[in-house]
Amino acid sequence: MTGQPLAGRRIAEVLATSTGGVGTHLRSLLTPLGRAGALVRVCGPAATDELFGFSAAAAFRPVGISGGLDPVADVRAVAALARATRGADLVHAHGLRAGLVAAAARRGTRVPLVLTLHNALQPGGGLRTRVLGRLEAATVRSADLVLAASADLAENALAQGARDVRLAPVSAPPLPPPTRSRAQVRAELGLDDRRPLVVAVGRLHPQKGYDTLLAAAARWAQAPGPTPLTVVAGDGPLEAELTRRIDSERLPVRLLGRRTDVADLLAAADVAVLPSVWEARSLTAQEALRSGTPLVATRVGGVPELVGEAAELVPPGDPVALAERVTAVLTDPERTARLSAAGRAQAAGWPDEAGTAAQLVAVYRELLGAPG
């Protein structure tokens, strides 16, 4: 592909409220799309531009798309997005919530809609779950193309009647090199040389399985030997609840809030943990393996296909299994070394940001045709 394959094409990228992977992924695409000649506008909540800096690489149109179902707010969001995407040649929605609003906003037009699925609806009962399931099915069927971040998401979209579904792994932007030594980070956390450091990174949200992590930490506190300090880098709606539990049970866990030094934390960690209820192509798992930090993660969603044999996997919601597997890694230097080397080797085979962006440019050109 030569020249600018998207020269003059007006592309609207749409996202809902995001503080993590979706926004990070979208930000990584903007510069390559611009180089391909696309005239990109990003449409989403104003807070996402403040957090990810979209407007440094594209036009930004504030549209208040919330992270949860809100009929009144959604009606307003549909109208606002219809205005914000007027004149676009193609609309690309990132995530189911953005897709729902984008599908409604482009109704009555022939503008192609691409939908990237980053997450799955969590199983459950009740009217709300049934409504969300129907809306999800309607949204994937309305898209001209569904890109799925993991194989299970692709299979689900096909089962719901999507017209065209393709696997499109989401690459994590490489972390910057650590700026502090392992010893410096550990000293700042009050750790001596003997005490292990367990690191989790991610939003404080039910999907991330931190209740299981806290239960595992309680078991470590009762075990002989140095008790690991578990630190969680991230913020979110469960912060107050998790803090109360940590304090009331006197758990060896510290919530660090949102951090910009994840590379430093992973380099200082003895083990990284990903206790999620569900993940597609976890950015945290990618960051841990790239950094050579041994990873213990749950066997959910797209995690097994992402990590292969390069991480220890446990069932979701099982604090006993999580605690035992982390302890096994911490007490076995040979296993630690093997996981560190295997993680880097596994990561070397993943698509990078350039490959992900090139795939997307090819998809857009396929839907739009060559520039006129």
Image (cartoon, rainbow, N blue to C red):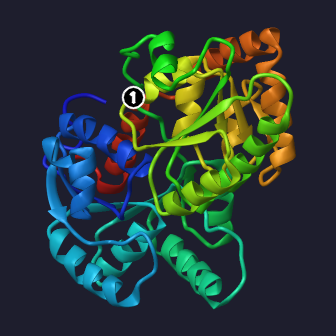
Q: Nearer the viewer, residue 95 or 369?
A: 95
What x and y, as percent, mark residue 143?
Answer: 45, 68
Is 133 rendered above or below residue 35? below
Q: Quadrant of residue 339?
A: top right
Q: Nearer the viewer, residue 160 or 244?
A: 244
Q: Nearer the viewer, residue 73 or 182?
A: 182
> Could you tell me which residue is drawn at 77 percent across and 26 percent down?
309
> Could you tell me which residue is drawn at 61 percent across and 52 percent down?
247
Q: Quadrant of residue 199?
A: top right
What x and y, as percent, mark residue 83?
Answer: 16, 76
> Could you tell me which residue is drawn at 70 percent across and 53 percent down?
249
Is 199 rendered above or below residue 215? above
Q: Quadrant of residue 111?
A: bottom left
- Mark 1 = which residue? 261
> Could you tell me which residue is drawn at 86 percent across and 27 percent down?
224
Q: Is residue 343 left or right of residue 237?
A: right
What x and y, as percent, mark residue 154?
Answer: 63, 56
Is 125 rendered above or below residue 322? below
